[in-house]
Image (cartoon, grey):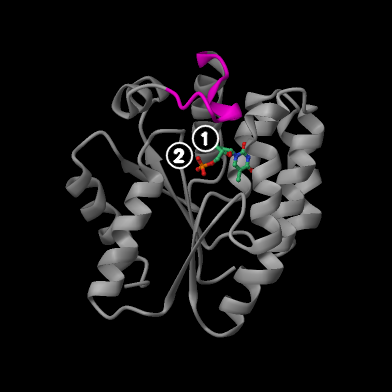
């Protein structure tokens, strides 16, 4: 879908921070045609679903239940934020989207990529991103940079091989659909990564 942009990466890669920096840059430079949002969440009901998914007390949650909750939050978020903003001619910049489900649920949780593609087809419909920025940093480096996992976050209390599977999953998606992905090497400084991100958006005609 034109003007729908997503950003993806492993936990701790600095994706949310880079998005915030970019948002601040837009505010400081009078760029007001970009709507910033995130998944899971981004709107009232979807944020409530996020709370259930990420609650450390919900460790007994079934993997398929989790996959459906992500898809449910996605439907609501598309309805509340993404579709209205695009209809108004805005650009939507979304921190995580369906690729996260493909790699975290389909591959990390081993539910199977095709199953998660099928499950999400109903939620996403024609709203696949125009392009997706992938901040490329191995989970090992990402966790070192972050200074370890957040123990209050259920999803960060999983073993390391999970995150490696997620990273390999992203690489697989990029291999399968290279035109949709903009891969940015995120191993440099914060400023370098931010610069690369803006360059991509200029090249793609967003800025
Ligand atoms: P965040 O840390 O980028 O806010 O994302 C929260 C967690 O949610 C992160 O560990 C990735 C996970 N996630 C999924 O497993 N599947 C999804 O579909 C989405 C959107 C996020």
Q: Ligand 1 is in which quadrant of the figure?
A: top right
Q: Is residue 74 magenta?
A: no
Residue 141 % position (x, y): 32, 23
Distance Cα–Cα, label 1 vs label 2 = 8 Å
Q: Identify residue for label 2.
A: 9
Report the side of 150 relative to 121 (left or right).
left
Residue 26 % position (x, y): 30, 71
Q: Which residues are magenta?
A: 149-160
Q: Is residue 119 above or below residue 162?
A: below
Q: Is residue 206 above or below residue 170?
A: below
The residue at the point 26 percent across, 33 percent down is 187
Q: Nearer the viewer, residue 20 or 4?
A: 20
Q: Identify residue for label 1.
A: 170
Residue 166 % position (x, y): 55, 28
Q: Is residue 158 magenta?
A: yes
The residue at the point 77 percent across, 52 percent down is 72
Q: Which quarter of the rendered picture does the N terminus lie within?
A: bottom right
Disc 1 vs disc 2: Cβ atoms closer than 8 Å?
Answer: yes
């Amino acid at each position: 879908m034109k003007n729908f942009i997503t950003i993806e990466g492993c936990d701790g890669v600095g994706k949310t921070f880079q998005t915030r920096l970019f948002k601040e840059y837009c505010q400081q430079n009078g760029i007001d045609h970009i709507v910033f949002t995130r998944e899971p969440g981004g709107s009232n009901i979807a944020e409530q679903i996020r709370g259930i998914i990420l609650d450390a007390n919900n460790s007994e949650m079934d993997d398929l239940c989790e996959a459906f909750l992500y898809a449910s939050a996605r439907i609501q978020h598309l309805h509340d934020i993404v579709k209205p903003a695009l209809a108004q001619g805005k650009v939507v910049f979304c921190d995580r989207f369906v690729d996260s489900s493909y790699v975290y649920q389909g591959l990390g949780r081993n539910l199977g990529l095709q199953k998660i593609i099928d499950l999400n087809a109903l939620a996403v419909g024609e709203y696949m991103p125009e392009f997706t920025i992938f901040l490329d940093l191995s989970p090992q480096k990402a966790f070192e940079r972050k200074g370890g996992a957040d123990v209050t976050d259920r999803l960060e209390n999983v073993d390391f091989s999970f995150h490696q599977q997620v990273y390999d999953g992203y690489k697989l998606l990029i291999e399968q659909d290279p035109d949709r992905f903009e891969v940015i090497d995120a191993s440099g400084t914060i400023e370098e990564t931010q610069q690369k991100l803006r360059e991509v958006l200029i090249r793609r005609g967003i800025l």
